[in-house]
Image (cartoon, rainbow, N blue to C red):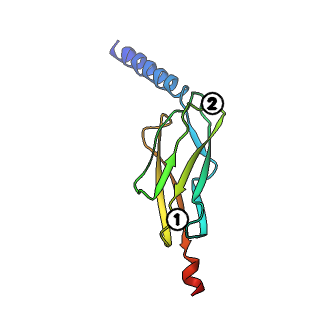
Amino acid sequence: MKKVMMILFVGFLTVQLNAQDTGKAQIKFKTEVIDYGEIAKGSNGVRQFEFTNTGNAPLIISRVYSTCGCTIPKKPEGPIAPGESGIIEVKYDTKKPGPFRKTISVYSNAGEMPTPIKIKGTVIDKSVLEN
């Protein structure tokens, strides 16, 4: 009798866990890395990460975080319906010459861990090159 009860309990638990996975948002980025290449000092540092909710529940992006003040991310305000797309805008301050690599963490209901997206490139000071 104990074996039958244990089998029923494990079966019930498995069904419950599978049922929870069916109503989940998922985020899929078109690209997870944007390469600015060589960009002139003081030029436009705004780029956009396009993503799609590939899950079957609304995607809610609660926070988009960068560890550096030189990178300012902007998240979508409302939920993204299943199958719909959205944009996360990232602005890098191009006033400081040199190479850069920055990671932006995207917190959402698509998972417990943040999804990392990255920017990289090199800011070139053309006035130094001309002298």
Q: CA distance from mark 1 to mark 2?
A: 35 Å
Amino acid type at mark 2: Pro
Image height of 5 relative to 72, above or below: above
Quarter the C terminus occupies: bottom right
Q: Residue at x 37, y 19 (%)?
A: 6
Of the two numbered discs 1 and 2 in the rendering, the one whose residue sits closer to the viewer? 1
Which residue is at the front of the view, 88 or 108?
88
Mark 2 crowdedness (10 Å alpha carbons): few <14, some 14-19, many ≥20: some
Q: Residue at x 35, y 12 (%)?
A: 1
Amino acid type at mark 1: Thr
The disc placed on residue 94 is 1
Q: Give the residue number, with chain letter if any, for mark 2.
A: 82
In primary-sequence order, the first of circles 1 and 2 is: 2
Which residue is at the front of the view, 38 or 9?
38
Q: Residue at x 62, y 29 (%)?
A: 81
x and y percentages locating residue 33 in the rendered image: 57, 57
40 sits left or right of 69 in the view:
right
The disc placed on residue 7 is none
State the count of labels. 2
Image height of 98 relative to 109, above or below: below
x and y percentages locating residue 56 in the rendered image: 60, 28
Which residue is at the front of the view, 18 or 7?
18
